[in-house]
Image (cartoon, helix red, strand yellow):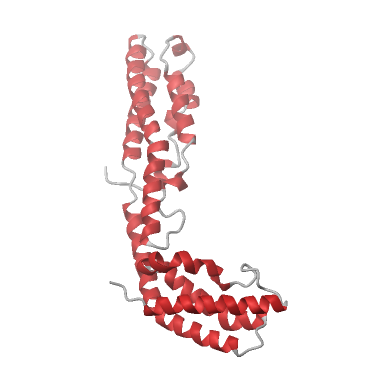
Amino acid sequence: MAGINVSYLINYPVELTDKDWQKKKGLMAKTVKTGLKAELDKGEKLHKLIDTARLLPTVNSPKTMEDLATGIKEAKSNYAKMVEPLISQLKTIVATAKKAEIALTKAKYTDAAKAAATIAKTADLFAVTCKSITFEDEVKEAEKRIKMRVDLAVKELKPSIDKFRKGAGDYVDSPGTKTDWDTLVKQHGRSVSNCVSTIEIYRKEFWKDFEKFKGFDSDTLKIGSEDPKHVTLRLKVLQLALAKVKEIADFKPK
């Protein structure tokens, strides 16, 4: 079977539920002990533990290849924790159902034997489905989106830096109010931040320090009032940011 999407795990086959089995088994056939009820119950419980969202490498909307690699690792880990135990239980259900089919056939409970055979076939097919889950198509699409995002960030980095520097100069010449900050510094600073956090080599080199500017939101930085102390602090933060932006502008990736 070709690789299939995680969504195929959402719905558990009705044929593998004890409720369906008891209905198809019939009253008379209940005298034959098959052990299927206990195994079917275990299968249902294991399936209910599966959170399909946690099997998606892109569940956290990766913005970089590093993020995507982390998502893939977590998805595989969650698959091992949630899906593999179900696969193992499905194999047990197949074996138990086949034995039940034989016992019910000998006891001449034809309909119940057919129901047991259906359970074995369905459990085997669903186990194959579980084994065939793949992230390949989703990962490829994510890689395309990330590449487009990175290409745009590379293109926008220098213009963003230039705009930030000009805005910073205008801010220094302004009264230095919160409104001045939001108008002249904040948006351009965010643009630089987005570029730095998106381009992997810049992210590794500068993001640890640059993210401390909190997207240049004065309230988040706790310098958002018109208190003279905050006016002074905004200038200090800006000077620190300009120094870091100069490092970024002068950086020559190898």
Residue 196, quarter of the rendered image:
bottom left
Image height of 245 relative to 36, above or below: below
Residue pictured at 37% horizontal, 66% vertical? 200
Quadrant, the N terminus: top left
Residue 36 shows in this picture: yes
In this picture, is 126 found above or below 234? above
Residue depicted at x 32% and y 20% = 98
Frontmost residue, 239 versus 35 = 239
Q: Position of residue 130 (x, y in %)?
A: 35, 38
Residue 73 in the image: above or below residue 239: above
Expressed as whole percent of the image width and height from the top left, the position of residue 158 reads: 40, 81
The residue that appears at 63% across and 83% down in the rendered structure is: 180
Residue 10 screen position, x and y as percent: 45, 42
Nearest the eye: 119 or 165: 165
Q: Is residue 177 rendered to the left or right of residue 188?
A: right
Residue 122 appears in which quarter of the rendering? top left
Q: How many marks?
A: 0
Of residues 26 and 160, the one nearer the viewer is: 160
Task: Give percent across and percent down for residue 42.
Answer: 46, 26
> Taking the image as drawn, is residue 114 in sight?
no
Residue shown at 40%/14% (left/top)? 34
User: Which one is in front, 163 or 120?
Assistant: 163
Position of the C terminus, as image quadrant, is bottom left
Q: Is residue 250 left or right of residue 240?
A: left
